Amino acid sequence: MVALSSAVAFATQVAFALLMLRLFSPQEVGEFSVISQIGFFWMTLALAQSQLGLLANQHQPAHIAAQHAWRASALRGLGLLPIAVLAVWFSQLALWPALLWALLLAFCQMGWMLAQSFTLRAGSAWQQAAVRVLPPVTAAASALTAVLVGASLDWNGPTLLLSALLGYAVGAAWLVPALRAREDAQPAHQDDTKTSNTTSQSDPRSAALRMAHTLIDALLATAIIVVWQRLYGAEETGWMSALLRVLGFLPAVVHMAWAQVALAQSRHPTTTAWANPWWIGLGAFTCVIVLGLSCAVALYQGWLDPRWHGVWPYIAPLVLWQGSACLSAAFSHRPFQTQSASAYSWACMALGVLQASVLLAPLGLANSVDAEQHMAAFALVSAVGLLILTGWMSQLRSRNTHANKHHLRSKKKSAI
């Protein structure tokens, strides 16, 4: 159910991205991408991977873990306000109302991320599906409605920002039951088996390490948009960010529909033992390639406005980068199941620093490289690093993994 709903959510978000290409100008998409990316950076840093801790540390009741995660994340978010101001200033957008939009997007998206983890642990199957599907459907439907209504009313408001905010708000609403629950309430079902099955799974990283890991990831994700805006302008940023938004959904879906589910359902080991992460990662990589080819066909056939022809040089590099990210995401649960989460964070931070050095290098050059060369170098370094990280994670084995394999072999033998 989670995999199916994540696929539907992915398809809806792709439709939303294609809607942006069809109905909005590169300038509008570029400005929306900058503000939404700053909001994403704000949200990611404020969470400090609390949504993963909510899944990995299953010794704590889900509603209590969600309450603590929200409070800590909200306080961090307020403390990060000066950094968000600096990011908006660096992007050369008007501080007002860009900062307000970024704040609203950040806190609503933060609630949505925690709601997804909470429903994986404490929600029914339909709740787990709805929390993933309804927000992107709401955003796409509201954007389309605003365009159709706005055409008759001659309204030129921030359609993309309003639609995204409404979608995130719908997702955040699913966290309300957890926040309203009393902390002394007992979970509906809790037994010794659950505790014994999850002893090998945990997130033992210190708060400082989690924050550092999150900071590197958030800075990199935001820097690529902000640096592109500063070096190459809003139109070039719109070309790059629109395609990145489409292709970047696949690694996110793999992480949500596979890695997070593997962590959440660790007390039911046979639920996810049947799937090989290599096949999941390679299947997602293939989907990235198909999406890239579809975009190329759309451009070649003239289905998109001629103003979007600048997307051409970004297709191959972004396919390589995001396809490699799919492979990495397919194994991202392994470090938490093998007591290797700290080593995983250090490896990710090292890769992030390497990526940042390639991304920021043109800022110090007298004659900057063009956008096509810059993206080719960045994507190549990112892909190689992600593949090396994937190879390391694929070698990690937990006691539960061996037990699962033995259980499946015994089951097959008994069936024979």
Image (spheres, helix red, strand yellow):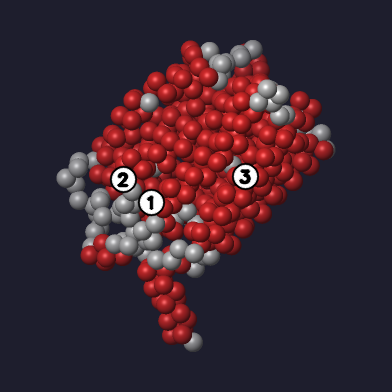
Q: Is residue 72 above or below residue 59?
A: above
Give the amino acid type for the residue marked by disc 2 in the picture. Ser
| Quadrant in the picture for residue 58 | bottom left
Q: Is residue 341 left or right of residue 244?
A: left
Q: Is residue 269 above or below residue 118?
A: below
Residue furthest to the right: 301
Secondary element at image label 2:
loop
Q: Mark 3 or 2 closer to N-term?
A: 2
Secondary element at image label 1:
helix
Judging by the rendered image, the residue that carries numbered circle 3 is 381
Q: Nearer the viewer, residue 386 or 81?
A: 386
Give the amino acid type for the residue marked by disc 3 in the picture. Val
Task: Write the residue at 37% across / 38% down.
Answer: 211
| Quadrant in the picture for residue 266 | bottom left
Q: Nearer the viewer, residue 333 or 382?
A: 382
Q: Mark 2 or 1 closer to N-term?
A: 2
| Residues packed near mark 2 inside 10 Å, few (<14), some (14 to 19) or many (20 plus) | few
- The percent coordinates of residue 2 (x first, y second) are 47, 53
Give the amino acid type for the residue marked by disc 1 in the picture. Ser
- The percent coordinates of residue 8 (x first, y second) are 56, 47
| Dots 1, 3 in contact, CB < 8 A | no
Q: Report how far apart the C-alphas of labels 2 and 1 lie in the structure.
A: 8 Å
Q: Report how far apart the C-alphas of labels 3 and 2 lie in the structure.
A: 29 Å
Judging by the rendered image, the residue that carries numbered circle 2 is 206
Disc ID at residue 342:
1
Task: Write the residue at 48% across / 39% down.
Answer: 217
Q: Report how far apart the C-alphas of labels 1 and 3 lie in the structure.
A: 23 Å
